[in-house]
Image (cartoon, rainbow, N blue to C red):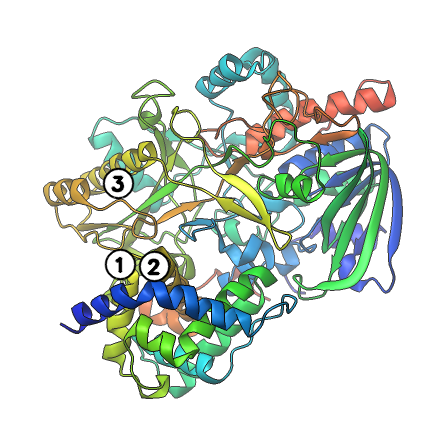
Amino acid sequence: MASRRTFLKVGAGASLALALGGGIYRATRASAPLQPFALDGEARAALGAIAPALLAGVVPGVGPAALATVIDDVHRTILALPLATQKDIQDLFGLLAMAPARRLLTGIAGPWRDASVEAVHTFLQDWRVSQFGMLRAGYAALHDLVLGAWYAAETSWDAIGYPGPPSVLAP
Amino acid sequence: MSTPIPDPVALGLARGWDVIDGATLDRDRVLEADVVIVGSGAGGGVTAEILALSGLKVVIVEEGALKSSRDFKMREAEAYAALYQESAGRKTRDRAINILQGRTVGGSTTINWTSSFRTPASTLAFWRDRYDLATYNDADLAPWFDLMEQRLGVADWQTPPNENNDLLRRGATRLGIPTGIIRRNVRGCWNLGYCGMGCPTNAKQSMLVTTIPSALAHGATLVTRARAERLVIDGDQVRHLVCTALGSDGVTPSGKTVTLRARHFVVAGGAINSPALLLRSNAPDPNYLLGRRTFLHPTLISAGLFAQRVDGYAGAPQSVYSDHFLQQAPVDGPVGFMLEAPPIHPMMLATTIAGFGPAHAETMREFAHIHGLLALLRDGFHPGSLGGSVTIKDGAPVLDYPIHASLWDGARRALLAMAEIQFAAGARSVQPAHEVAGPYTSWAQAKQGIAELEYRVHITRIISAHVMGGCMMAGDPERGVVDPDGRYHQLTNLSVHDGSIFPTSIGANPQLSIYAIVARMASKLAQSLTGKPAARPTAEA
C-alpha cells in the first residue's frame, strides 16, 4: 500500500516538482561556471539513507564504518566524472535535499536522517518503474553509484566468491 | 616495480620519446607539425604510425592520460575512472544507454576485449548500394585487413574458451545454432580475463603498445591530458587547433592551452567526440549531417544461473560468437543481432543486474555461477532506425538516441534467443537485464514472460561498447561529411579517420574495421602529402 500511495503522490506532484523544484534549485546556482560536485548537508544525509536500502542484504552488512566508506567511494566516483555530469548529479542531490521536493518525489516526510529503510525502499521501487523518465534515470544513477562502489571494494569479494585479480602479477 | 613484464611505454619514455603531459604545463604552448592527429585510439594510432613511418612530423593529442602495463592493476575501482570516458558511465541524453568508450592513450583499444572481425560483407554491400562507396568491397579491402591483422597479431584463438564462452557454444549447438571462434589481436596472451582494465602483460596488441610507440620512435610527439577544443577554420582551410590542458584530475581545465599548427589535420577522437569537435568548431555542414546517424550496437544482456562455477572473470573474455541471428532476414529487414559473452567482474555485474536490496544481494552471492550473454543489435539498416544524433551542451557532447520500434522488436527477439540458449546449456534460471523480468526457471516460462515484457527505456537495460557514425562518409558530398577517403568534403586539409565515418553500425565489434579502413585512408593521405608511396607498417616497425 505504501508503494501505491507514494506512486499517486508522485504522479500528482512530480511534474510541478520537476519543473519548479529543479528550476528553483538551479536558480540558486545560476550562472555559476561548472563546479566540482559537493556532497554536504542534506545531500550527504540523503545518500546516507539511500545507500543502506540499496545494499540491504549484503554480507557482512553495512555498519556505520562501511556506510561511511561507501559514501566516500561514491563521492570519489562522482568527482572523476566530467563537470557537466557532476552538475547533473548535483541537481539530483539538490532536489533530494530540498524538503518540498523530497516530500513530493519520494514521499518521505521528515529529514533524511529519520527515514526508515522501508520508506527509502518504497521510494526507490517507485522511481525504478516510474512513468517519469527522469525519476527512472535518477534511480538508475543511485543504483549504479552505490552498488558499483560496494562491489568495486575488495571487502565485498569474499561474500560473493570472487577471488580477486590473479596474484601472479601482484608486486 | 617487481612485475616481470617489460613495459614498452616506460622503456620508450626512458629512451626519450617526446611526450607532453598537459597536466604538467606551466605555460601555454604552441607546436607545429606536418599533421596533427586528434585522438590516439584505433583511428589515430593507425594514422600516426603510417604517417610517421612515411617521414611526416606528427603531433598526436589525447584527452586521456598515458597509462601502461605498470599501471594496469586489474581492479575495476581504478580502471574505469582512469581509462574510460566518464568512468565507464557515459550515457545517452535520456540516460537510457550506458556507453563504454576508452579515454586513455590507445583509446578504446587499450580497454577493449580484443574481438576482431572483418567488416561483414552484407554491411559493405549496403554501403556500396546506399552511399556510393564503390571502393568498399571485399577485394579492395582484403589487403588492408591482411596488413593490419599481421601488424596487430590478429589470429585464431587456439586456447579453449572459458566456461562463460563455452556455455554459449554448448547451448547454441544443442539448438542447432552455429557458433564460431573469435579471432583476437594478442601475442603471447596469458588468458587472464582482464582486457577491459588494460592488459597487464602487454599481450593485447592495442595502439598503446604497437602503433603509438612506433610513431613515437619515428619522431612523433604525443600530447596527453589535453582536450581538443576547437579547430580554427578560415575559408576552406583549418588554420590551427586549440586544446585545453586538463589538470591532474583529468577533468578540470588547468587554464593552460596548447595550440597546434599543421598542414593537415586528422580528427580521430572516435564517434561522439569527433563530430562534437567539428560542431564546436562550426565546421561547414551545409547538409546538416554532422553528428547525425551516430550508431551504437544497442546491446541486451541476459544472465543465466548455473549449478557449476562459471567464473566469468577468468580467461579470454570473448572467444565464442554466433552471427546466426544476423542472417535470418535481409540486412534492412527485422533488426538482426550478434551473440557474444561478456566478461563478468563484480562492479560491472552489480551495476548491470536490475533491482536492489536483498534480491540484488542474493543474485550477487551467485557471482561465480552467473553466465552472461550479450546481443548486439545491428542498427542503421532498417529504414525506420536512423540512430542517434550528437549535439553540444555546455561544450560537451550529448548523444540523443531514440529507440525505434524496430530496435525494441529486436530487443525482444534477442532476450528470447539468449534465454533459450542459456536453458539449452543447462541454466537453472535466467534473468534478462530488465527491471521487471524474471528470474525464469524454465524456457517455457521465459518464453512467455519475455514476450509479454514492457520494452521501454530504463526499464529494459541497454548498453553499448561500440560507437560509430556521426561523420559519415559517402561518395556524394550532399550525403556525407567525408568522402570515401576520409577527406572532409568542405575543407581541403581536414580528414576524419575513426569509427565516426561509418554510415551504419558494423554488425560486429568494430575495431578491425577501423584499423583496415583507416590504414587505407592514412596511406592515401601520406602519399598525397609526401608525393611518395606510403610506408607499410609491420610488426617489427
* Distance in Å between CA atoms under marks 1 and 3: 20 Å
Which chain letter matches label 1?
Answer: A
Q: Secondary structure at mark 2?
A: helix
Decide which of B125, B97 is in the foreground and name it. Answer: B97
- Tag 1: residue type? Val
Q: Position of residue B221 (x, y in %)?
A: 82, 45
Q: Secondary structure at mark 1?
A: loop
Q: Quick check: marks 2 and 1 in contact, CB under 8 Å?
A: yes
Both on one chain, marks 1 and 3?
no
Q: Quadrant of the N terminus of chain B?
A: bottom right
* Disc number placed over residue A129 in the picture, else none: 1
Task: Mark 2 or mark 1: name the one nearer the start of the chain.
Answer: 1
Q: Which residue is mark 2?
A: A136
Marks 3 and 2 belong to one chain? no
Q: Hey, which quadrant is residue B489 in on the image?
A: top right
Residue at point 43% right, 51% down?
B94
Mark in the foreground, 1 or 3: 1
Residue drawn at x 62%, y 25% is B517
Q: Is residue B108 above or below residue B84?
A: above
Indicate left or right for A88 with A140 as reference: right
Badge 3 amino acid: Leu
Residue B521 pos. (x, y %): 69, 24
Specify few, some or many for label 3: CA neighbours under 10 Å numbering under 14, 14-19, or 20 or more. Answer: many
Residue corresponding to mark 3: B415
| Chain to which the residue tagged by mark 2 belongs | A
Q: CA distance from mark 3 to mark 2?
A: 21 Å
State which quarter of the image contains the C terminus of chain B.
top right
Residue at left 35%, top 41%?
Answer: B165
